Image (tube, rainbow, N blue to C red):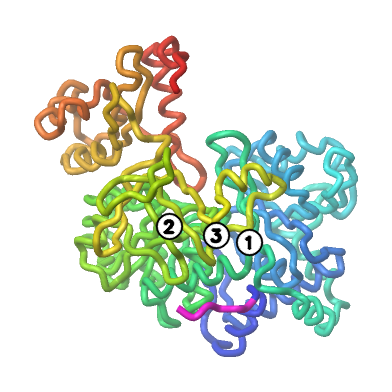
Amino acid sequence: MEMIEKTLGGMLDGLAANYPDSVAIKYTTRDYQKTWSELNDRCNAVAKGLLNLGIQKDDKVAIWATNVPEWYEILFASAKVGAVLVTVNTNYKEFELEYLLKQSDTKMLVMIDGVKNNSYVDTIDKVLPEFRNSKNGDVDNAKFPFLKKIVYCGAEGSTPRGFMNFEDIVKAGKNVSDEELNARMNSLNCHEVINMQYTSGTTGFPKGVMLTHYNIINNGKSIGDGMKFTDKDKLLITVPMFHCFGLVLGLMSCITHATTMVPVESFSPTKVMNAITVEKCTAVHGVPTMFIAMLEHPDFDKYNFSSLRTGIMAGSPCPIKVMRQVVDQMNMKEITIVFGQTEASPGCTQTTTDDSLELRVNTVGRVFDGVEAKIVDPVTGEEMPVGEAGEFCARGYNIMKGYYKMPEATAEAIDKDGWLHTGDLCTVDKDGYYKVVGRIKDMIIRGGENIYPKEIEEFYYTQPIVKDVQVIGVPSEQYGEEVMAVIILKEGESATEDELRELAKAHLAKHKVPRYIRIVDSFPVTASGKIQKFKMREEAIELLKLQSAAEIETA
């Protein structure tokens, strides 16, 4: 693949010149549709406002919002002025927001009112109690020495006291000339950092992953190529934009192929299925839980999926059974899987539309052009032979610049030879196709036996009564760890824990049969749909009273 040496702002300029009248973005849940030319004009207007408000190159602009139109506009506008867009998890509360604003040195925060029961405005009141007495979004607080502006996305008449409205950014740029904006854009380099994504922080504090224009644009190009995207495709984007899944696998794959974006602000099975039907989308992305929610929805048969062709299932291990259902019942005969992590922009491997269905449901594909990969022994670092499980390591154009202001953590993740150590356990076959068998931290070691949760999960997915399953390790004084299966049954189905255990006994080796089974209605998940196994483990320790076993120290 020939690498793209453009900035994100330059990419949008090119789309406006080459596809001026093609639809760039269209919502089905609100009155917002723009051609590439109109979107570029709007983003230029926002960028001029940022210039007038004193946003300098490398300043941090944070966005705390669902997939609203302003998300897209501030992304391109900040890129055009050389600012770094800091993406904020939509689930963040007071403690997490305060940490991110301080750690990232954010200068401007752009935010919506809130989501569900999480009021962002109330959170600001807690973090900055005196802010509401300010004018036009101005912030002057010693606790946040870099933070100067807080901007509200929403109707101008509904702007909470103290905030600046998003439209005021546009008004601020009225007197800024095209020449001023072009001068700033011409000073930028595609190898400069453009985005900071905060990792979920399941261990320790979240880390700001620094990604460049070059990282994310070229990764998006590789991913779009894998789906054979063109300007005739329409991608339904429901995965959150604050995550690489939405930003890179979604938006960047579109802008590198002039593909129309159809955003849904936050996931709802009916909104997604309606948008696919109404807009005749050719592609949709989602984590497995999203596809399961659609397939299991009582109104599934009322929607039309005949326009669908491709898309991506990713974000967590993809069950083979669910992949097959998506192919058969949602017409996604060219569905692909992308594997990687935020630190790799995020994609390292992908199955493509040309791969057989067997390969597309059983592997995560081959490594991208411009990326190297190897499987190593997590302890010795020695490269593993074909077919043997080890840690997946990657090196190439897609690897992050590092963690913001965390040199030690960066050195732990990327070794002296430039290899990113992902923590994922994988195998590779003789043809270069990779399989994910688990996470090093998720791997269960029971009495010296290595057990990969994915293998047990795949078995339960084949059972007609099981809707979803996650397998975790829980502490054991005797064996170090025991296997626990946390299962959601299909609606109307019932089974006892013993019955579910007996099913496994007939098909799995004795040491892989879950000692514990828990039937639940839902799993704890992050805002991006990732299942939080560590929370399940914490809950299990409480429920099963395994605190003493959990306190036993191991090497």
How would you rate the neighbour count of disc 2 (Cα within 10 Å): few for under 14, some for 14-19, many for 20 or more? some
Identity of the residue drawn at 26% across and 39% down? 457
| Label 2, label 1: how far apart the Cα atoms are | 19 Å
- Residue on which the image places disc 2: 271
Q: Is residue 379 left or right of residue 455?
A: right
Please name the amino acid that badge 3 sits on.
Answer: Ile
Instruction: Please identify the residue farthest to the bottom as the structure is shown.
Output: 18
Q: Element at badge 3?
A: loop
Specify the segment rendered in magenta: 1-6
Quadrant in which residue 36 is drawn = bottom right
- For the C terminus, give its image quadrant: top left
In this rendering, the answer to whether 26 lies above or below 484 is: below
Rounded to the nearest angstrom, the CA distance separating label 2 from label 3 is: 35 Å
- Disc 1 to disc 3, how far (Cα)? 24 Å
Identity, as a three-letter code, of the amino acid under mark 2: Lys
Q: Please state if 212 lies on the left or on the right of 137 as rendered.
A: left
- The disc at residue 399 is 3
Element class at badge 1 = helix
User: Of discs 2 and 3, which sits in the foreground?
Assistant: 3
Query: In the structure shown, which secondary structural element does the residue marked by tag 2 occupy?
Result: helix
In the image, residue 37 lies in the stretch drawn in magenta:
no
